Image: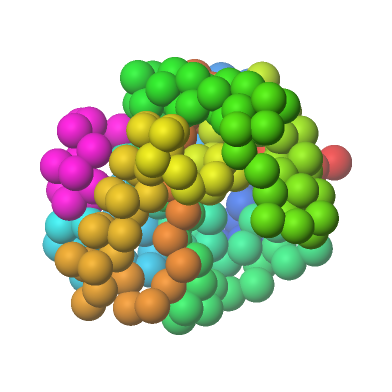
Amino acid sequence: MNQIKDMEWPFISSAEFLEVYPSLTIDEQIDFIRAYLVEGIPYIFRYQPISYETLRTQISNMMQIPERDICLVGSSKLGYSLIPKKFGTKVRYNSDFDMLIVAEDIFNNLILDYKSWLYDMYNGKIQPANIYELRIWLENIQLIDESILWGYINHWFIPYDTRYTSTSALYWSLSQILKSNANIIKGRKVTFRIYKNWKSLIQNLNHSLKYLIS
């Protein structure tokens, strides 16, 4: 644990990351993920911390969830990429905002929408526009099934349709957040990944990092 205590907070270099993380115990890795990958002000907002809190407040109010259950991850959080082939690449000014939302109710409602979409598709109540869209839908179904096992779901894999109320509400909320925070987001792509609980979020991040250090 001394390795974590001796590291600078809140930002660490990619070299420090590779040096320390592989040698940590499972419990220490969880502490590490919370301290450096999830909590605190993201690197991209290091000179504008209030802007980050403003964004979280907007999302909190729009989605009716606590601010503590909203976080920004990825290169915008650390300042560099954690993708194995791009590891250490410095965050770009226009890098995506990957937002993680911990909300069990929303997670469960999106699963209900997903099941409704599957039922409608297999019964001809909703149809893809063409063969290309059908291929995308089938790929998305596989991705959703896999993600649910990890305790999260990406709403954008479900078609936008008012019949799927929770999904369409999330699409609408995102559009409003983008509109009202245009001066903060500045044209970046923003995604919401909805997690069932914090345990699933931490386990998924920890699992992802295994590929980096293997």
Examine the structure image and report whether residue 68 is included in the region drawn in magenta: yes
Does residue 79 appear in the picture of this structure?
A: no
Q: Which residue shows up at 31% across the image and 33% down it?
A: 69
Segment tinted magenta in the rendering: 56-69
Q: Identify the image quadrant of residue 60.
A: top left
**Residue at figure coordinates x 55%, y 45% from the top left:** 159
| Vertical position of residue 28 compared to residue 41: above or below | above
Q: How is the image coloured?
A: rainbow
Relative placement, left or right, of 145 versus 170 is right
- Horizontal relation, residue 70 to residue 8: left or right: left
Q: Count numbered badges in the picture.
A: 0
139 left or right of 177 in image: right
Residue 55, percent from left and from top: 22, 57
Q: Is residue 146 above or below residue 52?
A: above
- Name the quarter where the C terminus is drawn: top right
Q: Is residue 87 or residue 100 the one in the foreground? A: 100
Could you say where residue 27 lies in the image, as x and y percent from the top left? 56, 20
Q: Position of residue 171 (x, y in %)?
A: 38, 49
Image point (52%, 78%), residue name: 92
Which of 133 and 45 lies nearest the eye of the viewer? 133
Is residue 104 in sight in this rendering? yes
Q: Main secondary structure of the magenta part?
A: helix
**159 above or below 29?**
below
Residue 8: say if magenta: no
User: Residue at horizontal 56%, vertical 41%?
Assistant: 158
In the visual, does 209 lie left or right of 48? right
